[in-house]
Amino acid sequence: QVQLVESGGGLVQVGGSLKLSCRSSVRISVFSVMGWYRQAPGKQRDLVAGIHSGGSTNYADSVKGRFVISRDNAKNTLFLQMNSLKPEDAAAYYCYARLDTLEGPVEVWGQGTQVTVAS
């Protein structure tokens, strides 16, 4: 069973930085896409950043220039470096991975890690 485990969330001041990690129980090279989503209370879960197997990345407009998604295949870990944090960045952050199989895509989610931004 594939598992994703996030870590690195916490409380940070406005303008501060945090680095989230997502450790996979399997080689992350098998995933066609990995990414980070976030969900604030009462809001839908939105994509923050994604990285494709070929290395291309995409970001939500609200985090461009402040967040960087990366991965370390040797450590089977996905990262999200978050800089210049704003109050609106506060949310539960979820790691996501998609595995393309003959039966169709399989989506895997982590349990989430909370990010709180204090003004």
Image: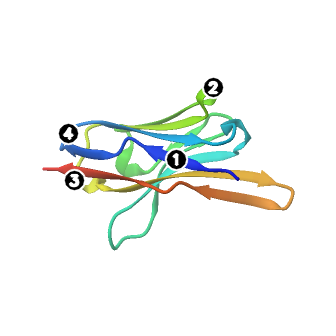
Amino acid marked by disc 3 = Pro
Q: Which residue in the structure is indicated by mark 3?
A: 87
Is residue 57 shown above or below 116? above
Q: CA distance from mark 3 to mark 2?
A: 34 Å
Disc 1 to disc 3: CB gap under 8 Å: no
Q: Which residue in the structure is indicated by mark 1?
A: 5
For image coordinates 87% across by 56% down, the residue present is 102
Q: Position of residue 44 (x, y in %)?
A: 42, 69
Q: CA distance from mark 1 to mark 4?
A: 26 Å
For image coordinates 47% across by 46% down, the residue present is 6
Q: For numbered disc 2, what is the local secondary structure?
A: helix
Q: For numbered disc 4, what is the local secondary structure?
A: loop
Residue 15: give its label: 4
Q: How is the image coloured?
A: rainbow
Q: Which residue in the structure is indicated by mark 2?
A: 74
Task: Name the outermost residue toward the bottom.
Answer: 42
Count the marks: 4
